[in-house]
Image: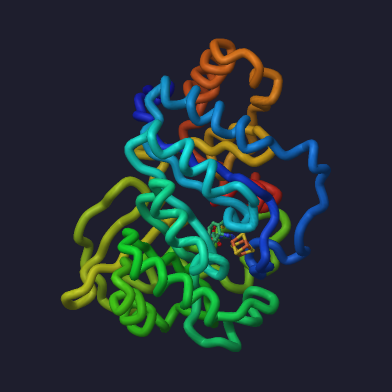
Amino acid sequence: MLDNYNREINYLRLSVTDLCNLKCKYCMPYGVEKCSHDDILRLEQLAIIVKALTTLGIEKVRITGGEPLVRRGIVNLIKQISPLVKNVSLTTNGTLLAPVCKDLKEAGLNSINIGIDTLEPDVYKELTLGGNINDAIGGIKEAYNFGFKLKINAVLQKGINEDKLPSLLDFAKQNGANLRFVELMPFDQTKDYFEKHYVSALNIIKRYNLKFAWRENNCSYYHYGDEIIGLITPISDKFCSSCNRIRVTAKGLLLPCLNYKIEYDLKPYLNDFDKLVSYLANCIKAKPKQHNLDNGQWQKNMFGIGG
Ligand code: SAM
Ligand code: SF4
């Protein structure tokens, strides 16, 4: 359906948990936040929300988190959702992926985005507070073997990977994946890290003499020699006018924009499908024109929203 600014909203990012097995410095510097089990929606409730949204034109669902693969029953949720939409995808850190690739394939999952910012084991370990890069690489390789469409997302960070485009691109290519750099975003809990490590994608364009190729939703693709690299630039070149997405969190909140402090509580509507659908329609209509990052009105953290 169309929102108040005539944008076609057809893409849902569904966060299934706030928990994660890693603690990336730019995402979860204070570790996991305790919350009551009762605050998190059951998988059946998440499936009802997806079903209701499909009646309003949502045709693509991305499962995210926290780390979605830490949530028990996730394969079953994907199995329920996949017949309802054209495309179901997963965003994961990849470390728990290898053993579940077969089940995910059978459940109807179409594509996987894996976050990996560095190929250096020590840097990875420090950045993720103890993560083992071999687990993530193993997940990527297994997903490739199972024929998933793959993207590798690297959060662009000064002093970490601003000069690592060629090696990351090589790695992505070897594993049948497209590489995208994502600009680091500020959140209240990660302000210090942002101030120290933010680097604009414009620096990468200049450093590697990238040439614009095309734009697809939130990602601009560039030629780098014979290769293609994607840049996601919420800060240096915001893409709000073509945004097609909404977010639903594991706590049952709908966020019409990642970086705007409005959220709608879906929980009171979960027992009445028709009321849920009409409430969702109002939430979609009310999507803000653009994000509020420039005004310093940041969200508390990323892991509770799902990216
Ligand atoms: N755990 C999964 C993962 O890491 O891919 C899924 C959830 S994570 C919140 C989703 C995406 O958000 C990841 O690609 C992660 O790198 C990115 N992310 C987290 N914090 C960020 C920040 N401050 N700025 C930009 N991207 C961020
Ligand atoms: Fe976990 Fe993903 Fe956040 Fe890293 S970015 S702490 S892997 S949720």
| Residue 253 placement: quadrant | top right
Residue 73 seen by the camera: yes
Residue 57 to residue 157: above or below: above
Using residue 2 as the reference point, say whether residue 79 is left or right of it: right
Percent across and percent down for residue 114 are 46, 64
User: At 41% across and 39% down in the image, what residue appears?
Assistant: 82
Q: Which quarter of the figure is the N terminus placed in?
A: top left
Residue placed most toward the observer, 3 or 111: 111
Q: Is residue 243 above or below residue 298?
A: above
What residue is drawn where x is 60% and y is 88%?
Answer: 122
Could you say which is closer to the camera, residue 293 or residue 126? 126
Q: Residue drawn at (54%, 38%), measured in percent from left and top?
A: 247
Q: Residue at x 46, y 42 (%)?
A: 79
Q: Is residue 13 above or below residue 215?
A: above
Is 281 displayed left or right of 263 in the figure?
A: left
Quadrant for ligand 2 reads: bottom right
Residue 244 shows in the view: no
State whether residue 197 is above or below residue 60: below
Query: In the visual, does 237 lie left or right of 131?
Result: left
- Front residue (pair 226, 206): 226
